[in-house]
Amino acid sequence: MVEGAAAVAVGSKFNNVCVFCGSSSGNTPEYGLAAAQLGAELVTRRVGLVYGGGSVGLMGAVSRQVFDQGGNVLGVIPIALQPVELSGESIGEVVVVKDMHERKARMAKESDAFIAMPGGFGTLEELLEVVTWQQLGYHSKPIGCLNVGGYFDLFFAFLDKSVESGFITASARQIIVMGSTAGELLDAMERVEVVRSSLVAAPAGAQS
């Protein structure tokens, strides 16, 4: 078992958690270690992983950990990114879709909560899209950031500045839960009770 993971199965109210993270590993080992610890924590809680389908970088680290420990893994990858994000054998069940829009929609549909790990533009875009969807009332699923080594500190400072400047409401600022370890973050997300926003009506067939 990865160091830092819980030793006893504790269960969860989530069946599947979607993880957004980089197809790169970053320039320090702590990112890969945190990804593996998150994977181990999901398995301990009997939670399946939904992710972007790649086998490289942090995507590969978290998915391999879940798969190797017998957990359920669902990867969703666009056709165009297969040569970029797949290296060798795929991990778990991989669904190939036509584009990024279909990828994000499928990942959201299959998940009960969302976690963002360190990553680049794609990770941030995926995170902010599900935050916006929750703000508008399209879903009521918890959202968290795994703040490995303070990676998201400046991002949260930006959100605070946006609240101060009148562009984000104080209540919307609370949509994203933060934790520095996988266990801490998942515990916090388990306690979240999201009240669906009434800003817009949820589309027909939308997942709650």
Image: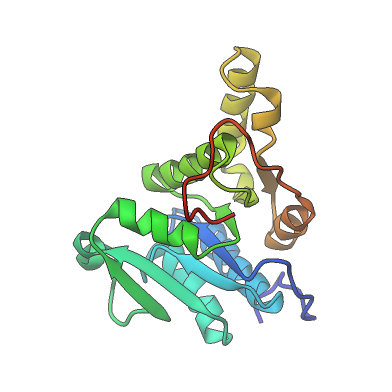
- Whether residue 163 appears in this view of the structure is yes
Quarter placement of the N terminus: bottom right
Q: Position of residue 27 (x, y in %)?
A: 44, 53
Q: In percent of the image, x 34 and y 79: which residue is there?
A: 90
Q: In percent of the image, x 73 and y 67: which residue is there?
A: 13
- Whether residue 24 appears in this view of the structure is no
Q: Quadrant of residue 102?
A: bottom left
Q: Position of residue 5 (x, y in %)?
A: 71, 72
Q: Quadrant of residue 198?
A: top right
The colour scheme used here is: rainbow
User: From what the image shows, is residue 12 above or below residue 98?
Assistant: below
User: From what the image shows, is residue 9 above or below residue 17?
Assistant: below
Q: In percent of the image, x 31 and y 82: which residue is there?
A: 89
Question: Depth check: 29 or 91 in front?
Answer: 91
User: From what the image shows, is residue 37 above or below residue 132?
Assistant: below
Total numbered circles? 0
Quarter placement of the C terminus: bottom right
Q: Position of residue 20 (x, y in %)?
A: 48, 55
Q: In percent of the image, x 58 and y 35: which residue is there?
A: 135
Question: Depth check: 96 or 181 in front?
Answer: 96
**Left or right, 169 with reference to 155:** right
**Left or right, 188 with reference to 118:** right
Q: Position of residue 56 (x, y in %)?
A: 36, 67
